[in-house]
């Protein structure tokens, strides 16, 4: 009887170690996939965006200003031109840029809008002819 109780206690101790360790491992895995991994992906995307920054790109700064890059002075400093009068040129760190729009991207968007507008106008003219 004493032997059975001793074996049961040893079995329970081994099982309790597993039940204590398993939630910790699951918590760490969940934290990695929900917090660390997306953060690394975002950092990688931002580093790529900063390395591809070039003269003529339109940027949105972290303070909410839109401007055009006119010079990449050093590795981490760019000169951005703000406003319509073209007199406001400010040197700033690349880290202060939150979004970049390439000139080619903006042209594609304008062409798509023009195509969709032309198609809509074509349908409107066709509908008027049918009436």
Image (cartoon, helix red, strand yellow):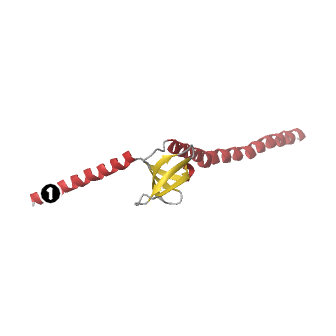
Residue 56 rendering spot, x and y as whole percentages: 42, 47
> Does residue 123 appear to the left or right of 6 in the view shown?
left
Residue denoted by label 1: 125
Asked whether 127 or 65 is in front, the reply is 65
Residue at horizontal 77%, vertical 45%?
Answer: 16
Asked whether 101 or 83 is in front, the reply is 83
Under circle 1, the secondary element is: helix
Q: Quadrant of the C terminus?
A: bottom left
Residue at horizontal 30%, vertical 49%?
Answer: 112
Q: Residue furthest front?
A: 87
Res. 11 image quadrant:
top right
> Does residue 105 appear to the left or right of 12 in the view shown?
left
Residue 123 rendering spot, x and y as whole percentages: 18, 55
Q: Quadrant of the N terminus?
A: top right
Residue 102 rendering spot, x and y as whole percentages: 41, 47
Residue at horizontal 57%, vertical 50%?
Answer: 95
Q: Determine crowd level at label 1: few under 14, some 14-19, many 20+ residues with C-alpha closer than 10 A.
A: few
Asked if 53 appears above or below 121 in the picture, the reply is above
């Amino acid at each position: 009887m004493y032997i059975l109780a001793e074996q049961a206690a040893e079995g329970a101790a081994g099982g309790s170690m597993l039940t204590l360790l398993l939630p910790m491992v699951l918590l760490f895995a969940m934290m990695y996939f929900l917090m660390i991994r997306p953060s690394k992906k975002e950092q990688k995307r931002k580093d790529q965006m900063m390395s591809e920054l070039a003269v003529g790109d339109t940027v949105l700064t972290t303070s909410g200003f839109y401007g055009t890059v006119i010079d990449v002075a050093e590795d981490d400093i760019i000169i951005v031109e703000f406003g319509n009068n073209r007199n406001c040129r400010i040197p700033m760190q690349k880290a202060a840029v939150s979004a970049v729009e390439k000139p080619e991207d903006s042209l594609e968007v304008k062409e798509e809008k023009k195509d969709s507008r032309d198609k809509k106008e074509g349908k409107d003219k066709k509908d008027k002819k049918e009436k």
